[in-house]
Image: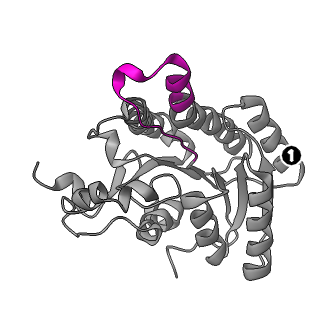
Amino acid sequence: MNIFDVKDKYILITGASSGLGHHIAELFAKEGANIVICARRLERLKELESHIKNEYGVQVHTFALDVNDRSAVKDMINNLEAEGVTIDVLINNAGVSDTKRFLDYNDEDWNKIVDTNLKAPWQCAQEVVQHMIKAERKGSIINITSILSQSTNLGVSPYCASKAGLRHLTEVMAVELARFGINVNAIAPGYMITEINEEYLTSEAGQQLLKKIPTRKFVEFDDLNGPLLLLASQAGQGITGIEIKVDGGHSAAPI
């Protein structure tokens, strides 16, 4: 028996139109899971939906929405229920950031980042958990945090605060939802090259940062495959309330 098997499970991934979310959707589709993807960019979602259906032959349900809009999340869940779909795993991946000095951030900047990175995962989890309980379905929630949930960097104060909050929320959720058979964990990636930060991480400053990472490499999307499959499958049934760091030893390195 393959205890990492996720075949025929329904996996809901937020922020799935690009980057890590896109990778996560394809990872689980490749393993035979059915996929529910949501993000704001419908065109990209439709491209991903077509690719997954053609390549892996699993079910794909696509929703264009803003995770900050609770009513839109409710509508998504209602539509899934009407189609007879019950979510097994929620992956709160959607997130945003910006780079400014602490004194330069304004209320709008702060609210956008903290709402998307902390409030939205809370809202999505509430709606999905109520859906799971109604269906009497045990499940798993995986929150994508960051190594900055426990460390700091200049210019990203609201991002650090939001990811620290999400890490702690993960622990509280794990305690409260255990009685329903719902596990809640977090995965904290280290620095990885994405559309947002590629220019910085490939610059001279980025190369100086690379020297501080014991493995001397930035995190790649594939590095998260093992932890994701662990926490989404029977293999992780005894694990709840933890944050798994995937950072090449960066957070353990000497200052």
Residue 121 in percent (x, y) is at: 57, 38
State left or right for residue 42 relative to residue 83: left
Secondary structure under tag 1 reads: helix
Q: Residue furthest left?
A: 254
Question: Can residue 238 be seen in this snapshot?
Answer: no
The answer to which image quadrant residue 69 occupies is top right
Question: Can residue 201 be seen in this snapshot?
Answer: yes
The answer to which image quadrant residue 133 occupies is top right
Q: Which residues are magenta?
A: 94-114
The answer to which image quadrant residue 30 occupies is bottom right
Residue placed most toward the observer, 95 or 207: 207
Residue placed most toward the observer, 180 or 98: 98
- Give the labeled residue for mark 1: 79
- Residue under the point 18% across and 58% down: 212
Instruction: Look at the picture and state if 149 lies above or below 247.
Output: above
State left or right for residue 116 relative to residue 54: left
Residue 189 in percent (x, y) is at: 38, 55
Instruction: Look at the picture and state if 156 lies above or below 57.
Output: above
- Residue under the point 61% across and 69% down: 28
Residue 226 in percent (x, y) is at: 43, 70
Residue 18 in percent (x, y) is at: 62, 58
Residue placed most toward the observer, 176 or 186: 186
Q: Is residue 50 magenta?
A: no
Q: Is residue 96 magenta?
A: yes
> Label 1 sits on what residue type?
Asn
- Residue under the point 38% across and 47% down: 146
